[in-house]
Amino acid sequence: MSEFVQALRALVGEAGLLCGGDLSAYELDWRRRFPGRALAVASPATTHEVAAVVKLCVAHGVAMVPQGGNTGLVGGSTPDATGAQLVLSLRRMNQVRGVDAANLTLTVEAGCVLQAVQAVAAESGLLFPLSLAAQGSCTIGGNLASNAGGTQVLRYGNARELCLGLEVVTASGEIWNGLSGLRKDNTGYDLRNLFIGSEGTLGVITAATLKLYAQPQAQMTALAACASLEAALELLRLAQQRAQASLTGFEVMNAFSLALLSKHFPQMQQPLGGSAWTVLLELSDAESELHAKALFEGLLEAALEAGVISDAAVAASHAQAQAMWHLRESIPLAQAQEGLNVKHDIALPVSAIPNFAAATDLALEAAFPGVRLVNFGHLGDGNLHYNVQAPEGVEPQAFLSRHEAAINAIVYDAVAVHGGSFSAEHGIGQLKRAELAARKDPVALQMMHSIKKALDPQGLMNPGRLL
Ligand code: FAD
């Protein structure tokens, strides 16, 4: 065994070290696109152990790949193929450090699973609103490192907006205690926001102080049928006008997304049939069930009368509401069953979405006749998952290998023309590194390189990711 691994074992103990054997849970990403090989997996149990491991890596020139739940979708959390990178797993750092209900904050360690964080907030009668389909396995450290979005961004913002303070082990192994629960603190550069979204390339997030909110008194969920994206946007405008901050979810699914669900998960009930677009609306009311119901029904009736929607189904129970969300969240799984596809997690000004989709659908169909578009996502905050599936009968892997670059060029050029971003909530990782180099403003890119050099001069924090 190498001197490095022996020293590592002395720092984290048997329980904190995996070396040899089957490490595939740490070496293979969720989408199975970036298999790697780890030198070892270190799972420190405390911030001081993380700092000691980082110092050891610096002394030996060993690159580190911070990892939380390994649910990231851009290949940022798995090692490369050299067998020389250490996976630094935060999963054992899963303590709740404290709830300050009067300050509406919660301080947790980075390895806490998102669902557990939501549960801790709920035990205090409060809400931690970050919510995404991977919440049973992703960690708060990973959520912050990738600035995750999810289904509640429209009302509460993404992970960045939900974090007040961080504790970080820097690339040289120092501990920065920035665990502030302050909502105002103008004392120079915003270091917290530098580490949020840095995808493990600047340091290791070991703990965070998070914002909490009051639990809503009532929640209403519905599906609504729209004939076009323009109509879906009109419904969004109506909903924002009537419900204002109570509108907490506004998701959209195209007909082909739902057709894939029917094909692969026929047991899932789809209450509405046949429209070009289906919107999933969620309203969270601070007043009462009665108030929520009146507001929601008024909104849907007005939309029906104005011809904005042709039909709607309101969930009559929590179980029905969950089933509606389950439909939306199962689309990526149905897509996976259909075969490999080219995924795009894009952001656009909401107003530009209908023109973007019309132009890009046409351009893709012209270039690849028969191509199938799985278009769904968080319409309320301008984030589409605009995914491209091979034509019926065409072998998906071959289609992807041959055409992925050309498809990306069509989609990302259109995104740029419409004032959007080629990465909305999943980040850059390995998957979009070339896009970042090619498409990011050159001055911004230069500043990013300068920051990386200043904070990680040896380039040992997650090298080859993001930059
Ligand atoms: P990992 O995958 O382990 O890591 C992600 C990145 O963060 C890597 O670059 C890693 O090096 C870095 N990192 C991890 N922990 C730390 C740390 N403590 N310090 C420094 N760097 C660290 N994302 C959305 O935004 N919205 C969605 O709606 C959404 N839905 C999803 C649904 C499914 C089914 C899946 C599988 C993923 C989904 N994602 C979504 C992707 C999302 O980014 C991740 O699920 C989550 O935020 C990553 O958390 P994780 O703990 O798994 O991080």
Image (cartoon, rainbow, N blue to C red):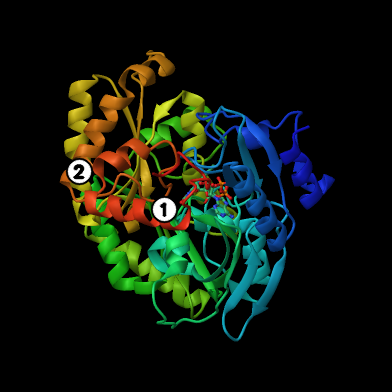
Instruction: Say which quadrant the C terminus sits in.
Output: top left
Depth check: 372 or 385 in front?
A: 385
In the image: residue 110, left or right of residue 8: left
Which numbered disc flags the more N-terminal residue, 1 or 2? 2
Question: Visible in this render: residue 194?
Answer: yes
Q: Which mark is residue 326?
A: none
Total count of labels: 2
Between 291 and 208, the one nearer to me in the picture: 208
Query: In the displayed structure, would residue 270 be above or below residue 11?
Result: above
Determine crowd level at label 2: few under 14, some 14-19, many 20+ residues with C-alpha closer than 10 A.
many
**Circle 2: residue type:** Phe
Q: Nearer the viewer, mark 1 or mark 2?
A: 1
Q: Is mark 2 within 8 Å of ligand 1?
A: no
Distance Cα–Cα, label 1 vs label 2: 34 Å
Q: Position of residue 329 (x, y in %)?
A: 50, 45
What element does badge 1 sit on?
Answer: helix
Residue 159 lies left or right of residue 275; in this view the side is right
- Residue 356: image tag: 2
Compared with residue 1, is residue 419 higher up or lower down, i.e. above or below?
Answer: below
Can you tell which quarter of the image residue 272 is in? top left
Residue 465: percent from left, percent from top: 45, 41
**Residue at the spot 65% in from the left edge and 37% down from the top edge:** 26
Residue 314 screen position, x and y as percent: 46, 57
* Amino acid type, label 1: Lys
Residue 58 at x, y percent in the picture: 60, 49
Q: Residue at x 29, y 23 (%)?
A: 371
In the picture shown, does residue 67 fall above or below 190? above
On screen, residue 458 versus residue 245, left or right, reads right
For disc 1, the marked residue is 452
Q: Secondary structure at mark 2?
A: helix
